[in-house]
Image (spheres, rainbow, N blue to C red):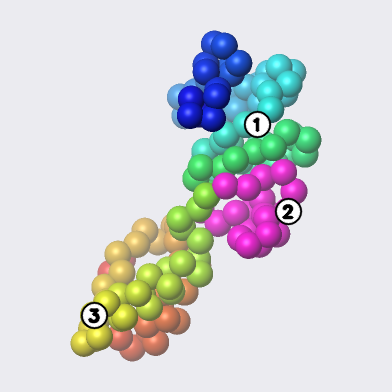
Amino acid sequence: MRDLGYVEGKNLVVEYRWTERKVERIEPFIDELIRLTVAVIVGAGQPVLFALHRKTEAVPVVMTNSEDPVRAGFAVSLARPGGNITGLTGISPELAGKRVDLLRDTLPGLQRIALLWHRTSGVEQLKSAQSAAKVRTTRVIQ
């Protein structure tokens, strides 16, 4: 930011808020930031992003961690998110299949891929990876 001419305390103010994993703190913090008329809000994690999605359409939001922003309704698509929320995700379901493809391209003789996942999350990623691996070559460890 400094290279672009922004200096905290001079022409830039950064407001930090930590929920300390207490969900009840999220919405009051968002309300406070909106009252401060911040230029942008950076949010991490599904509970924070769901609250931001509900609370504001005017303030730009940059997500730093979302399991699947399209499925969650934060974005219309990864290519064109629409709305006021944009940012990064590394856990989008279609990426699981792409990772399997990358493994195959990197290791042409690869015949088995083991996927280790938790049964309460990542179901779409698992389906994408299984589809890309043609199920018969994929062993799932639960």
Of pointers 1 and 3, the one earlier in the residue sequence: 1
Residue assigned mark 3:
107
Give how far across and how far down residue 90 sits, in percent.
45, 55
Disc 2 from disc 1: Cα separation:
16 Å
Of pointers 2 and 1, the one earlier in the residue sequence: 1
Q: Is the magenta region chiefly helix, strand or loop?
A: loop
Q: Which residues are magenta?
A: 67-87
Q: Which mark is residue 40?
A: 1
Please say whether residue 111 is one of the residues in the magenta stretch.
Answer: no
Above or below, 71 against 62 in this view is below
At horizontal 34% and vertical 62% (from top left) the residue drawn is 117
Of pointers 3 and 2, the one earlier in the residue sequence: 2
Residue 21 seen in this snapshot: yes
Label 3: how many Cα within 10 Å (few below 14, some 14–19, many 20+): few
At horizontal 55% and vertical 24% (from top left) the residue drawn is 5
The residue type indicated by label 2 comes to: Gly
